[in-house]
Image (cartoon, rainbow, N blue to C red):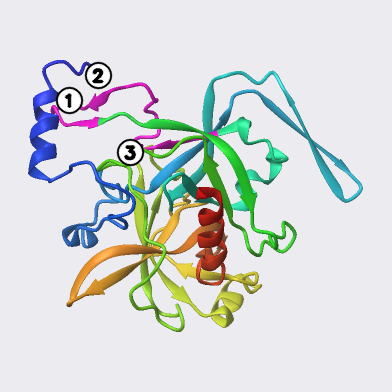
Amino acid sequence: MNAPGKLISFIVWTIVNGNCAVSAEANCGRLEERLLFTKNPSTEPTEYPWIGLLVQREGKLWSIRFKRASFYLYSDLNQKFESAECNVAIVGESDVLTTASCVRRLNNRPELVAVRLGIWDEKDEPGQQYICNDRGFCVPGPVQYLVDAITMHPLADKDTGTNDIAILRLSQRINMTAYIQPVCLLPTLEPASWTSVDFHYGGFHQSDIKKGKGSAIAISRQYCKYETGTPPPENQFCGYPPFRDAFFKGAAMMGINVEDDVPRSFYLVGLLVRYVDVGSFMIVFQDIKPVRHWIIDNIKSTSS
């Protein structure tokens, strides 16, 4: 929609909400307690600002299966990008996380994908200075970053699904704003087990073009096996959500850092790798705890 005449609304909204530019070193896991209890399935523009969308070059991707190996051929690719139906999560100055299954087919060709950050509505395109709705509510347009390198977990197994995680190194440092910020990687206090903990998660999904959110209770491996017929792969766990929204892979599951009896920030607990609908609707998450040091070490090594 036309933006002229509505910039004042954006400025006022920004001032009221205290949304000034921030740095990754000083800020992570932005949390507003009031938003923990809202029933709106869509996020606010500044909510979960670490969530982005993986996009891929438009064109045809052909898969050829030869014995036990898969080969991918690319044709008619162009400079335009379309949704890859995978979420990413900002974890560093130039790094985002997604699932290994989202990028495995790229054959280590990072030029085939990019990430859109600061995106709230999936239909919005980069290059728009700000986007306004009919009520004069304005937010900055999304920013697209090219990918410079893809690092999959060395023990990622496409057959079992375990260690389904990858780091995308962007071609330039992320410009952090109120709408683009990292999630914390380190908890202030972490439970020994996730079982029976109620977590928040967010990302893009099939039901709406807006960035969505939900909650899920982590359940035991035994109960997950009873409900789905098979236990989750190693380093993964099941969550039981109250609603059947099919989020794209890479949706971030978060725990909450509490300090002085106040919820202060979100830290990353898991990445959605798949959902299982066999009467009961279960979400399977890649557990971040066992791979956290690998993430931190690889972010450090690529930053040096």
* Residue 303 visible in rendering: yes
Mark 2 vs 1: CB contact within 8 A: yes
Magenta region: 114-139
- In this rendering, would 188 be left or right of 261? right
Pointer 2: what residue? 1
Where does residue 216 sit, x and y in percent of width and height? 40, 66
Q: Nearer the viewer, residue 137 or 184?
A: 184
Residue 193 to residue 296: above or below: below
Q: Nearer the viewer, residue 240 or 102?
A: 102
Q: Which mark is residue 303?
A: none
Pointer 3: what residue? 120
Instruction: Please identify the quadrant where the N terminus is shown.
Output: top left
On whether residue 137 falls in the magenta region, the answer is yes
- In this rendering, would 187 be left or right of 219? left
Nearer to us: label 3 or label 1: 3
Residue at figure coordinates x 20%, y 18% from the top left: 3
Find numbered disc 2 in the image and state the secondary structure of the residue it sits on.
Answer: loop
Query: Upstream in the sequence, badge 3 or badge 2?
Result: 2
Q: Hey, what amino acid is under mark 1?
A: Asp
The residue furthest right is 67
Q: Quadrant of residue 107?
A: top right
Where does residue 85 sit, x and y in percent of width and height? 52, 40
Pointer 1: what residue? 134
For disc 1, the neighbor class at 10 Å (few under 14, some 14 to 19, many from 20) is: few
For disc 2, the neighbor class at 10 Å (few under 14, some 14 to 19, many from 20) is: few
Residue 94 to residue 56: above or below: below
Q: Hey, what amino acid is under mark 3?
A: Trp
Query: Upstream in the sequence, badge 3 or badge 1?
Result: 3
Q: Real-space Cα distance between discs 3 and 1? A: 16 Å
